[in-house]
Amino acid sequence: MVGQKTGGRTAGTPNKVSGELRKTLKGIVAAELDGLPQTLAELPARERLELLIKLLPFCLPKVNHISGSYDNDWSSLGEN
């Protein structure tokens, strides 16, 4: 019976454990975020800066390098 599903959840049924775990972790993270300003204020400047650098990728998108060829004839752009 290769390729045939023989048991488990039916298609579209959410995983109960994953949902509960996600909800619990979301609560923990929310509580930590509420106390983050005080925690940051208590850290030495070097540790505070290191932590902020680690958190930046979650707040700002990464910038990708763009390359291209600019050998076009731009003189014709103004002509109609």
Image (cartoon, rainbow, N blue to C red):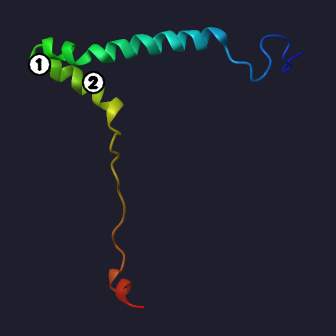
State whether residue 15 is above or below residue 65.
above
User: Mark 2 and mark 1: span between their CA atoms?
Assistant: 13 Å
Residue 42: quarter of image: top left
Answer with the quarter of the image where residue 58 lies. Answer: top left
Residue for badge 1: 46
Location of residue 62 (image quadrant) = top left
Residue visible at 28% across and 30% down in the picture: 56
Name the spot of residue 20 as percent of width and height, x first.
58, 10
Using the image, determine if residue 57 lies above or below residue 9.
Answer: below
Which badge, 2 or 1, comes first in the chain's sequence? 1
Residue closest to the eye, 6 or 21: 21
Q: Is residue 29 left or right of residue 23?
A: left
Whether residue 31 is situated above or below residue 80 in the rendered picture: above
Q: Callout 2 environment at 10 Å: few (<14), some (14 to 19), or many (20+)? A: few
Residue kind at label 1, given as amino acid type: Arg
Horizontal and vertical percent for residue 26?
Answer: 46, 15
Return the mark for residue 54: 2
Q: Position of residue 57 (x, y in %)?
A: 32, 31
Quadrant position of the N terminus in the picture: top right
Residue found at the very far right of the displayed protein? 1
- Tell me what residue is drawn at x 37 percent, y 86 percent: 76
Instruction: Kindly identify the residue that appears in the image at 85 percent across and 18 percent down.
Output: 2
Specify whether 41 is left or right of 7.
left
